[in-house]
Amino acid sequence: MAGEQARDPLSYLWAPLCAVGSHGERPNAQICVAVFGASIVPDRPRVLVGLWKENHTHDLVARAGTLAVTLLSAEQSTLLAPLGLRSGRERDKLEGIEHRLTRAGDPYLPGGTGYLAGEVIESFDWGDATGYLVAVRERARLTADEPLFWRDAAPLLPGSFVSTFQEKSARDQAAARRVMIWRDG
Ligand SMILES: Cc1cc2nc3c(=O)[nH]c(=O)nc-3n(C[C@H](O)[C@H](O)[C@H](O)COP(=O)(O)O)c2cc1C
């Protein structure tokens, strides 16, 4: 369409912005767009969650074997920086952020559209990341808000977010390039 930039088809495959949480000594959460429905059997719901190995949450999920996924609402775009640009390895990222814990002890954010939580039943090594196949054990709608997509959130984010995100992405991509499973075509 005139005046509109054509979108990369891959960009439509990003899930709504989610906060994926797990726990060790304390709960932690990170932003994630690699969350996919992975079951056709209604009473056996599964999701596949892709977490990069550099992330603290990745290691927490590997150890705890459980996670929670909150679908963020538009109001929660302010959480993209604290949960998506910084690591919880050295700090309590959830301090000052309203959250609740699932039965397993994983954090979800009550201001979100909804949440689901469950148990890892298989892990797939992608080299740079792990795909966690999760059996969903609990889920609920939290608010009447619709989920938030990156394409809608991105134009509204401050310049300070964009510059930090670009620098972090360049570092993350270089690290992923070194170890990712890939075959040149
Ligand atoms: C918009 C956005 C999308 C992201 N998507 C993913 C993703 O799909 N998977 C992932 O592992 N990290 C993703 N991240 C990066 C993590 O949220 C980020 O590295 C975070 O600081 C990790 O925190 P942790 O070390 O406390 O786990 C995304 C970040 C942003 C801002």
Image (cartoon, rainbow, N blue to C red):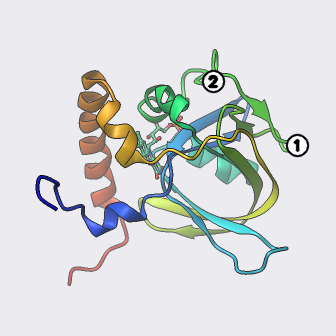
> Viewer-proximal residue, 58 or 33?
33
Q: How many marks?
A: 2
Task: State the quadrant of the C terminus.
Answer: bottom left
Furthest-top residue in view?
Answer: 96
Residue 3 relative to residue 146: left or right: left
Name the residue: 74% across, 48% down. 64
Residue at mark 2: 94
Question: Eyeballing the image, is 126 above or below 32?
Answer: below
What is the three-letter code of the residue carrying label 2? Leu
Name the residue: 82% across, 41% down. 102
Instruction: Kindly indicate the quadrant of the structure image that contains residue 26.
Output: top right
Name the residue: 30% across, 24% down. 158
Residue at mark 1: 103
Label 1 SS: loop
Residue 72 locus on image (x, y percent): 57, 40
Is the C-beta separation of discs 2 and 1 under 8 Å?
no
Residue 117 locus on image (x, y percent): 75, 51
> Viewer-proximal residue, 54 or 71?
71
> Viewer-proximal residue, 54 or 41?
41
Task: State the quadrant of the N terminus.
Answer: bottom left
> Viewer-proximal residue, 120 or 109?
109
Return the disc, 2 or 1, that comes first in the chain's sequence.
2
Residue 42 locus on image (x, y percent): 80, 75
Label 2 SS: loop
